[in-house]
Image: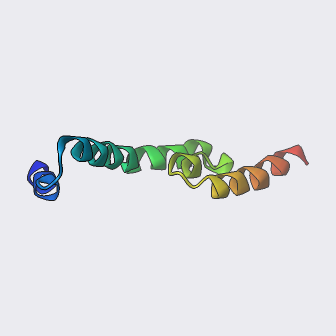
């Protein structure tokens, strides 16, 4: 993997390379953690919030919470 990153960033200066790497790390989401969140707090939309899908997370929570209030 480091060879692939090196080939992508060989024309970048240090500042651009640092920005690229920080964005790459920031976008990586662990699929196992997303699955675990789905199994434990899926009704509340925790997995959607984790994956950055805030709107869907809110929809999940709004549909799940009233189910237990009634």
State the residue in front, 60 or 19.
19
| 46 relative to 4, above or below | above
Q: Position of residue 1 (x, y in %)?
A: 14, 52
Is residue 50 at all visible to an observer of this figure? yes
Q: Position of residue 66 (x, y in %)?
A: 84, 50
Residue at 57% over, 55% down: 53
* Occupied quadrant, residue 60: bottom right
State the residue in front, 56 or 15.
15
| 29 relative to 56, above or below | above
Counting the numbered discs, the total is 0
Residue at 36% over, 48% down: 28
State the residue in front, 3 or 61.
3
Is residue 29 at all visible to an observer of this figure? no
State the residue in front, 67 or 63.
63
* Occupied quadrant, residue 26: top left
- Asked whether, in this view, residue 17 is left or right of residue 19, the answer is left
Q: Position of residue 58 (x, y in %)?
A: 70, 52
- Asked whether, in this view, residue 21 is left or right of residue 69, the answer is left
Figure colour scheme: rainbow
Residue at 83% over, 46% down: 68
Residue at 72% over, 49% down: 61
- Asked whether, in this view, residue 54 is left or right of residue 64, the answer is left
Q: Position of residue 5 (x, y in %)?
A: 16, 52
């Amino acid at each position: 993997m480091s060879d692939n990153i090196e080939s992508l960033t060989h024309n970048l200066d240090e500042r651009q390379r640092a920005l690229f790497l920080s964005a790459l790390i920031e976008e990586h989401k662990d699929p196992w953690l997303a699955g675990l969140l789905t199994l434990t707090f899926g009704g509340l939309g925790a997995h959607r919030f984790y994956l950055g899908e805030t709107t869907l997370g809110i929809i999940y929570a709004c549909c799940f919470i009233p189910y237990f209030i009634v």
